Image: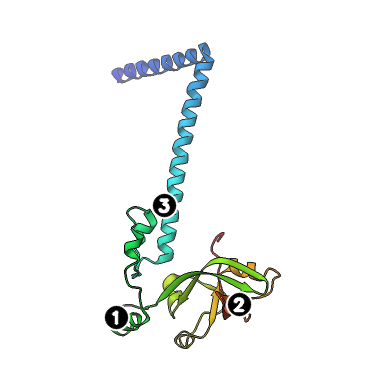
């Protein structure tokens, strides 16, 4: 017990001397102490900023994969990894690959038995017009039924296509909020109105629910 008390006294004595030495150093050279404190502060701030950026990037990646679906298989002529990273993406080679066809989609529908849903989509960019209002260079998807269940978007107003409408190729459209707000700035509901997509007239039947700031 005496040895423990002796060791404790030595420890606290050394601790007190250390604090006293540190205080004397700061008191003797305030500018040097300020620079040291500033360096430590900047270092901590930099570490926090890096971890915050990494956390934000990780969250964005998770959101992207969540929107694509972790249990969805995509068949495309292009390499998604190469497009995302930009490394070794020889687009001229991928461009030579054949496009997915509607006949292949029907074949998969008939023969694939373990999939819950199968859908086909084609993507292009076009101008969308309503009256004098135009939204240029907009991404346009031509899709079949079930695409809304695979891509996980929600129709906020109106409705989605029926299976019969997609089979019969009836010219209908479900548009995003940003496009709707630019085409109908006066608060007019797009539902039931005709718009032109790349020169083709289609009727708006639904609005996609807005995600975040997009």
The reply to whether dot 2 and dot 3 touch (C-beta < 8 Å) is no
Q: Residue at x 46, y 39 (%)?
A: 48
Residue 195's tag is 2
Q: Distance between the residues labelled 2 and 1?
A: 36 Å
- Residue 202, how many percent across, how many down? 57, 80
**Quadrant assignment for the C terminus:** bottom right
**Closer to us: mark 1 or mark 3?**
1
Residue 112's tag is 1
The reply to whether dot 1 and dot 3 touch (C-beta < 8 Å) is no
In the rendered structure, the answer to whether residue 189 lies left or right of residue 166 reads right
Residue 156's tag is none
Q: In this view, does 54 lie above or below 102?
A: above
Q: In which quarter of the image is residue 133?
A: bottom right
Element marked by disc 3: helix
Q: Quadrant of residue 95?
A: bottom left
Other residues around mark 2 within 10 Å, as few (<14) / some (14–19) / many (≥20):
many
Element marked by disc 2: strand
Rendered image coloring scheme: rainbow
Q: Quadrant of residue 86?
A: bottom left
**Quadrant assignment for the N terminus:** top left
Element marked by disc 1: loop
For the residue pair 124 and 15, the one nearer the viewer reads as 124
């Amino acid at each position: 017990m005496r040895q423990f008390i002796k060791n404790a006294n030595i420890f606290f004595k050394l601790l007190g001397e250390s604090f006293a030495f540190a205080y004397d150093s700061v008191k003797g050279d305030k500018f040097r102490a300020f620079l040291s404190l500033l360096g430590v502060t900047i270092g901590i701030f930099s570490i926090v900023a890096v971890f915050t950026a990494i956390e934000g990037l990780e969250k964005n990646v998770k959101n992207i994969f969540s929107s694509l679906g972790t249990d969805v298989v995509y068949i495309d002529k292009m390499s998604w990894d190469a497009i995302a990273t930009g490394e070794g993406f020889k687009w001229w080679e991928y461009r030579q690959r054949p496009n997915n066809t509607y006949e292949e989609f029907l074949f998969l529908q008939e023969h694939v038995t373990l999939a819950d849903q199968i859908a086909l989509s084609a993507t292009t960019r076009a101008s969308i017009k309503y009256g004098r209002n135009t939204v240029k260079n907009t991404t346009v998807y031509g899709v079949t039924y079930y695409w809304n269940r695979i891509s996980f978007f929600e129709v906020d107003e109106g409705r989605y296509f029926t299976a019969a409408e997609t089979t019969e190729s009836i010219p209908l459209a479900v548009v995003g909020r940003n496009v709707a707000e630019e085409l109908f700035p006066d608060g007019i509901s797009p539902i039931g109105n005709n718009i032109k997509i790349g020169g083709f007239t289609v009727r708006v039947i639904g609005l996609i629910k807005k995600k975040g700031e997009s």
